[in-house]
Amino acid sequence: MERKTEIASEKHLGLSDDDDPSLPSRCKWSLLQNDLPDPHFHQKFISKPMIADCILNCIGNTPMVRLDRIAKHFGIKCQLLGKCEYLNPGGSVKDRIAFRMVEEAEKEGLLKSGSTIIEPTSGNTGIGLAIAAAVRGYHCIIVMPEKMSDEKVNVLKALGAKIVRTPTNAMYNDPDSHLSVAQKLHEQIENSVILNQYKNPYNPIAHYDLTAAEIIEQTGGQIDMIVAGTGTGGTATGVGRKIKEVIPDCKIIGVDPMGSILAIDHDNDSDVTHYEVEGIGYDFVPKVLDRSIIDRWIKVDDFESFKMTRLMIKLEGILCGGSSGSAMAAALKVARDLNESQRCVIILPDNIRNYMTKCLDDGWLMDHNFNIFDEFKTNEPVCFEDQIKQLIGKKSIKTIDQSAKCSEAIKIMQENGLNEIAVVEKANSMILIGVVTTKKLMDLMMTKKVGEDFPITEAMIKDVPMVSMNDHIRKLSYQLKRSSFAVVIENELHHQSQPRLKFIATRIDLLNYMNECRS
C-alpha cells in the first residue's frame, strides 16, 4: 500500500481554514469499524536492551507503582496504580510523542540535514523535541507562552534550543499566540518544519502503540479505570482507543483544569479563565483529541492540583509536577466508586524539576493565594496563625508623595531610621505607587543613574511583595524570607486595582512580634 500520512499532507502547517488545529480530525478510527485501511505505520511493543545506543532509546517502559499511602490517606478501597511517565529522559510523557513525530518526519523526508524544528508548546513537548534535535543534529526553536516556568526555559537553552515567548492571554488564533508565531517563523526560516503536536496523528499513535501496550502488560489487562490529563489530548486518545479495543469495559477519565474548554458536559463558561497548572487544558479543542473516547470528564482547579502534587511528594516520594497532581486529584473523585478488587491507573505525566520555583516553592504558593499548608505544617511558631493586622496594631507609617525628589526621601529615611519608604499617589491618599529603599537608592546613585534632584519615581520599586491585613503571619514570614520588606495593604490583592497602603513590614517587625508572643 502506498504510504500516505496526514503529516505529509499537512506539511505547511498554520492557522488557515484548512490547517486550523481546532478543526475536527479526519481520522476514521472507530471501535465499531476497525477494519478500514490504516494509513499509519505502527510500532510493536518490545522490551528495551540493557545498554541503549542513545538517550532517545530510553524513552518509554516507565514503571508502574502502587499508591497505597495516598489510597489509605483518602480512604480509597480500590488499587491505585501510578504510571510514572515523569521518569522519561526529558521528565515527561511528551518525550514519547516528540521522538515519534521526529522519526516519522524523517521517514517522510520532512526532516533532513540542517533542518530546523519549530514547535508551539507549553514546554514539555519542546524539551522532548530539543533532546531529539540535539541527538539527531537538528536546529530547534520552541515557541511558548510567558506563563511557562523558567526551569523549562533553562533546560531548553541547555539543550541548544532557541526560545520565543508569547503572551499567556493570547487566544490560540490570535496573531500573537504561540501557534501563530510558530507559523510566522516557519514561513521565514528555510528548511524548517512544524511537527505540530495539536494535529500530528503520531501524537496519539505513539500512545496507542506503546504507552497503552505497556499499561496492558504491566497490569495483565486487569484495569477498570484509567485517568489521564488532557492538553493536546494525545495521551487520553491514544491510550483510550487501545484500551477500549482490548478491555472494552475499562472507563477512560479525562482531566481538564478549571478555565479550559476541553471537557464535555461541564460548565466551561465559569468566571475562571486563567489557570497556573501547566501542560493541560486549552482554549480550543485540538484535532488529535477524540473526546468520544472519554467516558467521564473531571474538572480540577489549581488549588486541588498543587495540594495533591505536594501530597504525592510527601506521602509517596513521587517527585511529580502540577499536571500529575491534577490527574491524582481527579482520580480520587472517581475511584471512590470502585471496590477492593478493582484497579485505577493514573498517568503521571510530568516531574517536579520544571516547577521548582512554582508549586514546590512555598513563597510562590503564598503569592498566588494557594493556602495549601494545613497538611504540611512544621514546628512553626503559634503566632503564625495570627493575622497581620495584629502585628501592625497602632503602628504608623511614613510616606512620600510621588511628585517628591530623591533628596526628600533620603531626608525622611535619615530622620526616622528607615530603610524603606512608601511612595503614594498624593499626600495622605495611601494609594500605593511603589517603594523606595536605601539599597535601591545607593545602587542607582553609585552608578550615577539618578541623583538627589531626580524624581522619586525614577528610583522606586514598582513590583513589590504584598500581603493583606487579614493574611496570616505565616504568609508574611514567607515574603520576608525572600525580601527585606513586604507592603501590607488593606484588602485582598484581587479585590482592587489600586492597593491601599497600611504598613511596610520588615524582618525586625516580625522578630519583635514573635518575641512578644513568647513573653
Image (cartoon, grey):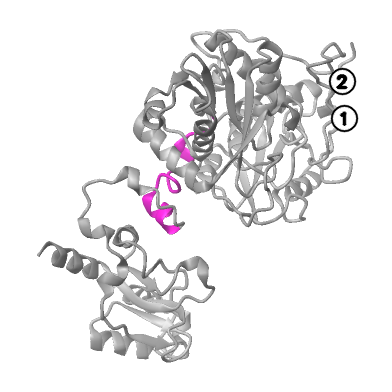
Q: Which amino acid does label 1 sit on?
A: Ser
- Left or right of 131 on screen, residue 464: left
Point out the image quarter for the N terminus: top right
Query: So how many labels did they put on this image?
Result: 2
Residue at the image point whose x is 49% and y is 32% from the top: 332
Q: What residue type is labelled 2?
A: Lys
Of mark 2 and mark 1, the one earlier in the sequence is 2
Residue at the image point whose x is 80% and y is 25% from the top: 109
Label 1 neighbour load within 10 Å: few <14, some 14-19, many 20+? few
Provide the residue designation for mark 2: 4
Quadrant of residue 347 within the rendered picture? top right
Residue 48: % across, % down: 55, 10
Magenta-highlighted residues: 348-367
Residue 59: % across, % down: 56, 21
Point out the image quarter for the C terminus: bottom left
Quadrant of residue 37 within the rendered picture? top right
In the structure shown, which secondary structural element does the residue marked by tag 1 occupy?
helix
In the structure shown, which secondary structural element does the residue marked by tag 2 occupy?
loop
Residue 472: % across, % down: 32, 61
- Left or right of 436 on screen, residue 393: left
Q: Using the image as rendered, state which of residue 432 and residue 56 is in the foreground.
A: 432
Provide the residue designation for mark 1: 9
Instruction: Decide if residue 498 is in sight here.
Output: yes
State if disc 1 and disc 2 touch (CB < 8 Å).
Answer: yes
Q: Looking at this rendering, what residue extends furthest in the left direction?
A: 519
Q: Is residue 352 magenta?
A: yes
Residue 127: % across, % down: 58, 36
Q: Give the vertical position of 129 relative to 59 (above or below).
A: below
Quadrant of residue 513 within the rendered picture? bottom left
Residue at the image point whose x is 41% and y is 29% from the top: 318
